Amino acid sequence: MNLAFAGIDRDALRRAGRMVVSIEGMWCASCALAVERTIARSPGVTAASTSFAGGSALVRWDPDRIDLDELFTRVERLGYGIVPLVESQEMERQIDAQARAVWMRLAVAGFFGMWSMLGSVALYLDAGLAASQAGWWIALASCLAALPVVTWSALAFYRAGWRTLRAGVPGMDALVSTGVLASCLLSGWSLLRGSADVYADTATMLVSFLLCGRLIELHARRRNSVAVNALRQAVPETVRRIGVNGVPVEEPANRVGPGDLVLVHAGERVAVDGTVVEGEGEVDAAIVSGESAPLPVALGDRIVAGSINLSSRLVLRVDQAWGQRFIDRIGVRMLELLGTKSAAAMQAERFARWLVPAALVLAAASFTVSWAGGGDPVQAALRALSVLVAACPCAVGLALPLAYAASTASAARQGILLRDPASLEALANAREILFDKTGTLTEGMLEVREVLGSQHAAPAEVLGLAARAEADIAHPVARAIRSAAEAAGAASCGDGLVQRHPRGCTWRSPDGQDMLLVGSAGFVEEQGVSLPPGAPADCTRVEVVRNGKWIGAILLQDRIREDAARALRSFAEAGIRTRLVTGDSAAAAAPVAEAVGLGPDQVHAHCLPEDKVKVLERAGKPAVFVGDGVNDALALAAAECGVAVQGATPAAVATAGVVIASGGVEQVAAAWRHARRTVGVVRQNLAFSMVYNVAVLALASSGMVTPVAAAGAMLASSLSVMLNSGRLLSGTSARQRT
């Protein structure tokens, strides 16, 4: 029995039919594939998906056929640990520890590999030196310098390679291990024969570059952990729980459960999912819907964790336990969705899986044919080892990391942050791009669109009076009214008595002769004031009443980004479909869609976070989602590429694969152009390196390429990949490209 699950009800878990677990000990994406294959082959399992970037696995099974102990045993027998989903802080600690270990291995590989490389280069450049006794001693020194690299630094590759071989899915680790060991074996054999033909530089360079690739992957894992953590940080860690004596006591949010009563003051974030049992007011529920306008709540209405209480005291009855809140479920779903590998990386892995058995078979065949044909056994062995040296996938291993590193540096200078190769590739090949509305195509801030006057007051007076009443109120609507009044030159100082109500406010002059009501239609009608008909449904409307008479209204809307229409037009010209996906109402989304050139059939309104994921699932692949809010985090994770615009929330930034650090929506188009150029370079790198491996393998197996020539060709191939990737550093700015 797996002790990690000892305290969990096995029957309940079995009946659930699914679980998301953490996998301990995964070193690379090949490890994740091996674990996934092992889980999928377990009796009763119907689907398995393992993410190295998320450090997790999603498993679904038939409750009547599953044997959980057998499932756990199979994973542990492979050399990995399967445990309940760990908290994001613990995941970050584990990733940081693994990254430190990789840095240490890379430092050793860099230091000792440098000395090993110097000796090898000297022998390559001077044939006379290589044939002398001094050359043999230089070759020996080069091999001795490489020992720490091919033993300690490469140990994790050997371990992962063996595990993936056992699982029947050998990947880059198995191929790297084969190439490194073949280089070491051939170098040792050459030294014993008195030859200076050694290949220590091949082994050290391969290990060093693959360690660099591991650091890139660990960075992606760390980002995913930060994304989940940032999502949870959007809610408070403490609550005011109302005890049996009616006195609220502050305590950790994870100690309250269904049925408990929690007090939430005005201006505070809600820490629980619950139902209003006392009070009424307005909340900012953008964490769920992205709606910029405040949402009225009253008795019986449900509020989710992360919402902001904007107006008055509320008492909630908790209806979801810690870990089952809406935001917790989004976090688990994000772990299921994060960490997709790029097509280029999967292509390299598939090539590696094909190359391992092909190289071994060709090496064995070369040895057999050469020896059976009456050749010298030593020469036959050299031919076989030439095949294994030629199979070293330096260029294949470098094709993606080098291009990605150069592309990341170039994009950063333009205010575009690239997080992982998979997102970059998906953006380059995008067929459909979905945009959030509030904060993405709009600026996420209400502004006064129009002021309606009446026979009792001109529009300027209506605005000035409303600003005076809202002078000291911290509310999105109040801030927008004050800003408009200040821009119009109207004073908004608070010189009277203000009383805040859940859906508005009242203001009395110091002498008590003047009274204003400012708020929603429902609020002023409750005070006995009749309103004229005809309130538009596509904006927020604030009524203004003076001494019992309606004097006007203020219409507010979210400001559309200036470059939004140009950006969407550029995508349409490139043949990429665009859509608007928002939690706002259809009426609020319609004017924004019209302003940026989208038709009614391209608008999806009233979308909760999970609804946005469903729209993504129906979109053309690869699909890109562009957003900015906490409510967009799930869609950003679900999309093949998530793009967070400037000013996005920490949760959105942490989840996105591409972050626009400076600039507007047009920078999304600039990032797309840059991604297309990068993917073109990656494909060139992969094509050249794969052709090289196939060609040299064929020549080496026929005896036409010596080990020295194979090593030289490998070095030339790697240099060509480096030079081709370097073009990304000197390319034209993405903002200037068309």
Image (spheres, helix red, strand yellow):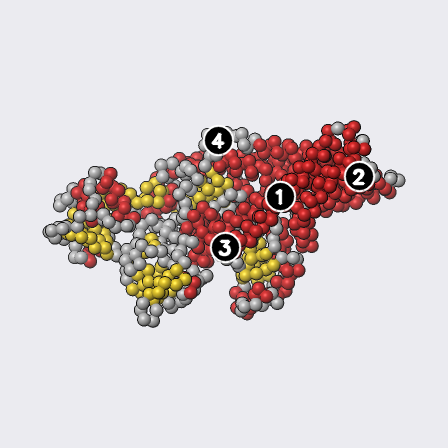
Q: CA distance from mark 3 to mark 2?
A: 51 Å
Per the image, label 4 sits on a secondary structure element best described as: loop
Q: Residue 376 at what x, y percent from top left?
A: 87, 39
Q: Residue 617 at what x, y percent from top left?
A: 49, 50
Q: Earlier in the sequence, mark 1 or mark 2?
A: 1
Pointer 1 with pointer 2, Cβ within 8 A: no
Pointer 2 with pointer 4, Cβ within 8 A: no
* Residue 517, placed above or below residue 277: above
Please state which amino acid type lies under the numbered disc 3.
Gln
Per the image, label 1 sits on a secondary structure element best described as: helix
Q: Which residue is mark 2?
A: 190
Return the residue nearer the eye: 692 or 79. 79
Q: Residue 582 at what x, y percent from top left?
A: 39, 48
Q: Is residue 613 visible?
A: no
Whether residue 228 sits left or right of residue 688 in the image: it is left
Q: Earlier in the sequence, mark 1 or mark 4?
A: 1
Please state which amino acid type lies under the numbered disc 1.
Leu
Q: Which residue is mark 3?
A: 89
Per the image, label 3 sits on a secondary structure element best described as: helix
Q: Earlier in the sequence, mark 3 or mark 4?
A: 3
